[in-house]
Image: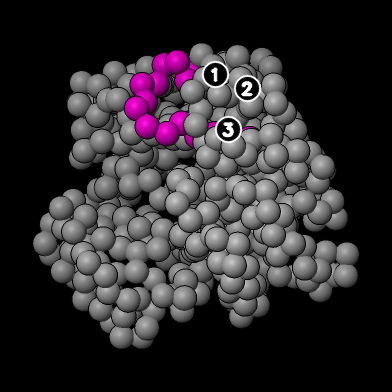
């Protein structure tokens, strides 16, 4: 695995143009969910103390560098995991170190979404929560190996609505409809969220990463398209709109976003930073992460210098949120990348996947289907191989079982720097 040299905090800060948000990763979980491909470890109090000490150092170094570069205060804070609310005292100390003017968002395990737990998050300044319900059906939750039941998920959402911008995560797997015990569960879960008046529902298709116990599997694209079109119709009838490929928002409500933030600096094991032309990835392993910080280095394990090709990555995540603003592409990457992108999008518009709007293009209903398939391809061809390489630092994963990808090997050869 190639590793970058001594990358400095100021080098990372200077790679950004304009204001940036912050993503912080807390990898601890009381139980490992078998479907989840993200960076996580079983909670251990001793390891947590060491980790949060190292994380505090990384935060301080990057905040100071971003301040010197004129990037502070940050535009937003997003804390994910893992289970970020597992260590509330450490979380409180961490939040106090990060100057933010905009939204403060955090992922919440349903059993932590009690009134007292949410009171504490509100006191820390969090304005948005994402409740990881995944389903309100116990049969589905058992299949996913979740550490809570449907009643806890429902109670957490009810406790949060009206106090925060509330997102609810639901998992979609059309194969469940082949089993009478779980048939129709997803659309019923969606209706439950809409009836509760949440601000946003994130309907994530189950990703079957080869290195997880769920293993690699084919997907039925036509059935997935059909269920998401049905979800769009149900949401529209309830006063919600499809604001991104997999999210439905109450009309007029604030969006809850993570991956669609345009620029972000990552802090913590397994986090990533996207500066437009550069993509940085921290160590996934907590030992490697802590040792790097404790020795005075940033814990960066991989550096992809995208250059102008960053316009493609940038536009891909713009499209996830429903459209591409070519004015933003031109301002960040220049006229040539914007012109090439404009020509490619014009061809997609001829195929009725996009419709022109002022400054760019928006996805059509047919375009949402296309992007759904493209997102799966990117996930399996680029994200899974990268994460599998990083997860050799972890004992729970089986990276040798991950998909192999010629696309990732080419991308790594072209863009990775050391």
Question: How many numbered discs, if any?
Answer: 3
Residue 372 % position (x, y): 51, 69
Callout 2 secondary element? helix
Residue linked to disc 2: 119
Residue at the image position 62 percent from the left and 39 percent from the top: 161
Residue beneath disc 3: 163
Work out how far the residue at label 2 is from the one at label 1, CA to CA, in angstroms. 6 Å
Which of disc 3 and disc 1 is earlier in sequence? Answer: 1
- The reply to whether discs 2 and 1 touch (Cβ–Cβ < 8 Å) is yes
Query: Do the residues under discs 1 and 3 have CB atoms within 8 angstroms?
Result: no
Name which quarter of the figure residue 297 lies in: top left
Magenta residues, as a range?
A: 94-108
Residue at image coords 41%, 50%: 260
What is the secondary structure assignment of the residue under circle 1?
A: helix
- Residue 296, x across and y down, in percent: 37, 17
Q: Secondary structure at mark 3?
A: loop
Q: Is residue 96 left or right of residue 239?
A: left
Q: Is residue 59 above or below residue 303?
A: above
Outermost residue toward the right?
A: 181
What residue is shown with label 1?
123
């Amino acid at each position: 695995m190639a590793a970058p040299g001594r990358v400095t905090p100021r080098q990372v800060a200077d790679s950004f143009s304009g204001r940036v948000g912050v993503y912080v990763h807390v990898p601890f979980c009381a139980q490992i969910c078998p479907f989840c491909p993200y960076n996580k470890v079983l909670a251990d109090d001793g390891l947590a103390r060491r980790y949060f000490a190292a994380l505090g150092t990384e935060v301080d170094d990057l905040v100071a560098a971003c301040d010197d570069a004129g990037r502070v205060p940050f535009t937003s804070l997003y804390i994910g995991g893992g289970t970020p609310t597992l260590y509330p005292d450490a979380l409180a100390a961490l939040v106090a170190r990060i100057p933010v003017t905009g939204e403060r968002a955090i992922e919440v395990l349903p059993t932590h979404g009690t009134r007292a737990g949410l009171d504490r998050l509100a006191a820390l300044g969090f304005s948005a929560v994402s409740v990881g319900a995944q389903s309100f059906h116990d049969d589905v939750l058992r299949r996913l190996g979740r550490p809570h039941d449907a009643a806890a998920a429902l109670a957490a959402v009810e406790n949060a609505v009206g106090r925060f911008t509330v997102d609810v995560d639901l998992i979609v797997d059309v194969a469940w409809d082949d089993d009478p015990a779980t048939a129709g569960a997803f659309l019923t879960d969606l209706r439950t969220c809409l009836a509760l008046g949440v601000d946003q529902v994130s309907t994530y298709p189950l990703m079957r990463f080869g290195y997880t116990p769920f293993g690699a599997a084919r997907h039925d694209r036509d059935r997935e398209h059909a269920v998401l079109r049905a979800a769009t119709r149900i949401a529209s009838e309830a006063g919600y709109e499809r604001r991104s490929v997999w999210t439905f928002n109450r009309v007029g409500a604030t969006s809850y976003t993570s991956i669609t933030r345009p620029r972000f600096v990552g802090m913590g094991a397994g986090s990533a930073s996207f500066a437009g032309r550069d993509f940085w990835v921290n160590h996934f392993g907590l030992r490697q992460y802590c040792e790097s910080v404790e020795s005075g280095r940033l814990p960066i394990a991989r550096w992809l210098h995208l250059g102008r090709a960053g316009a493609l990555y940038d536009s891909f995540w713009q499209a996830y949120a429903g459209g591409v603003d070519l004015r933003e592409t031109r301002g960040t990457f220049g006229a040539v990348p914007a012109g090439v992108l404009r020509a490619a999008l014009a061809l997609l518009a001829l195929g009725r996947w996009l419709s022109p709007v002022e400054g760019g293009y928006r996805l059509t209903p047919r375009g949402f289907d296309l992007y759904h398939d493209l997102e799966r391809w990117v996930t399996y061809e680029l994200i899974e191989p990268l994460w599998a390489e990083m997860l050799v630092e972890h004992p729970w994963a089986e990276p040798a079982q991950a998909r192999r990808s010629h696309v990732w090997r080419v991308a790594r050869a072209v863009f990775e720097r050391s």
